[in-house]
Amino acid sequence: MKFVYTDGKRNELKLTYEQRKECLAYVELLGFEHSIDFSEFSNTAFVCNSEGERYCRLIIGTDVYPNGSATNPNEIISYKGAIAHEIVGHYEAWLYGFECDNRYLDEAQASIRAARFAPFLSFEERVALIKDGLIRLKKGNIKLSDAKKLMHIEER
């Protein structure tokens, strides 16, 4: 039974116990100390609320894993790359006030930050994240030269 729909581009099957353990181990290595929820109904995402008391959580959906039949960079991003995208890319940018208003720019920034700063990623995982970021800029019709001025990608 499929709950998270990715149009077949990412994993849509329930995560195994071992996959959940792998994800939690990597989240721990990244130092994320907030709520973590596994969901068969939501895509992998960082969720925050800046109103009043700051609250955040990481949702790990079935799509955290690739499905093995990739045709673009986003489809080959590993579970570590996907988690790094959410924590190093989105959470840390949110924490320091470096979110981008443009959806394409924000997603590109998250992938590029993850590629540059997340520990324990292979060269191939970093390349996939960089390519994903570049494709997101292209989809948003944003020139790389313009994006570099708007994204916070120079330091963690």
Image (cartoon, helix red, strand yellow):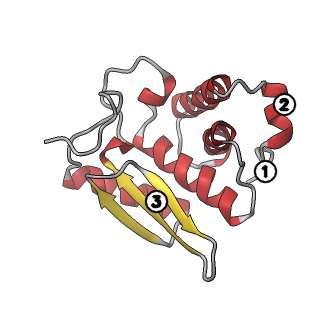
Chain-order first, disc 2 or disc 1 = 2
Q: Is residue 148 left or right of residue 138?
A: right
Q: CA distance from mark 3 to mark 2?
A: 32 Å
Q: Secondary structure at mark 2?
A: helix
Q: What residue do we see at 60% from left, 39% from top?
A: 111
Q: Amino acid at mark 1?
A: Glu
- Judging by the rendered image, the residue that carries numbered circle 3 is 27
Q: CA distance from mark 2 to mark 1?
A: 18 Å
Residue 121, above or below 29: above
Q: What crowding class fits label 2: few (fewer than 14 Cα within 10 Å), some (14-19), or many (20 or more)?
A: few
Residue at the far left in the pictured view: 1
Q: What residue do we see at 49% from left, 41% from top?
A: 81
Q: Secondary structure at mark 3?
A: helix
Q: Position of residue 100 (x, y in %)?
A: 72, 48
Chain-order first, disc 3 or disc 1 = 3
Q: Secondary structure at mark 1?
A: loop
Q: Quadrant of residue 91?
A: bottom right
- Are dots 3 and 1 in contact, CB under 8 Å? no
- Judging by the rendered image, the residue that carries numbered circle 1 is 155
Where is the C terminus found, in terms of image quarters?
bottom right
Q: Amino acid at mark 2?
A: Asp
Q: Amino acid at mark 3?
A: Val
Q: Position of residue 8 (x, y in %)?
A: 29, 27
